[in-house]
Image (tube, rainbow, N blue to C red):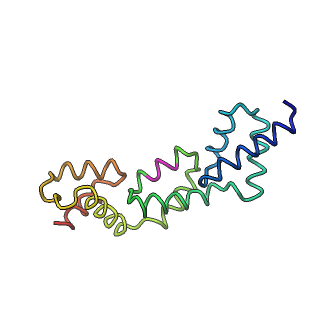
Amino acid sequence: MNCSNESEKALASARRFIGYRPRSIKEVRESLKEKGFSTVVVEEIISSLIEEGLLDDEAFAKMWIEERSNHKNLGKTRVKSELRSKGVASEIIESLMETGYTEEEEITRAGSLLNKKFRNRLNEIDTEKQVSFLSRNGFSYSIAKKAIDSLK
């Protein structure tokens, strides 16, 4: 495969991949490498997509935080972990998390998640089970406890 043809195929593949939903740079890089494109071509395509504004880890992280915290009601720890696994730089994660999560919002999200999961059975479910559930969804013990207390 000549380099120009390989580049065109890689670019088309990357555009299709980011067409489904926004992606991090790491996700696009891994996708292209899994499809067998050379490292040189992959890096060329990544650079091209960044220049075009189609790949931006900060914009991706903002979208991810919005989606996972507001629509899925996930906690700060879980969202941070997901972003790290997607290759977003720690500096970007920390700067966006400072502005996106207040304690009151976390307590509200945790309460909403508890209500969604346990519905009308909240008083029947052991507090330890509720804390464990919230912990798995990225909430600290103190936030979980405050959310549980606020619902009683």
126 relative position to 68: left or right:
left
- What residue is drawn where x is 48% and y is 60%? 67
Out of 124 and 92, give the one closest to the viewer: 124
- What residue is drawn where x is 59% and y is 54%? 21
- What residue is drawn where x is 85% and y is 38%? 5
Q: Which residue is at the far left?
A: 124
4 to 69, vertically: above or below: above
**Among the 4 quarters of the image, the one containing residue 121:** bottom left
Q: Which residues are magenta?
A: 79-83
Out of 119 and 148, give the one closest to the viewer: 119
Question: Which quadrant is the N terminus positioned in?
Answer: top right
Residue 34 point in image, percent of width and height: 65, 33
95 relative position to 39: left or right:
left
Q: Which residue is at the far bottom?
A: 104
Most frequent secondary structure within the magenta stretch: helix
Residue 44 is one of the magenta-drawn residues = no
133 to 95, vertically: above or below: above
- What residue is drawn where x is 65% and y is 51%? 18
User: Could you tell me how many numbered marks the image carries?
Assistant: 0
Residue 116 point in image, percent of width and height: 28, 60
**Among the 4 quarters of the image, the one containing residue 143:** bottom left
Residue 138 point in image, percent of width and height: 37, 52
7 relative position to 35: left or right:
right
Question: Which quadrant is the C terminus positioned in?
Answer: bottom left
Residue 27 point in image, percent of width and height: 61, 44
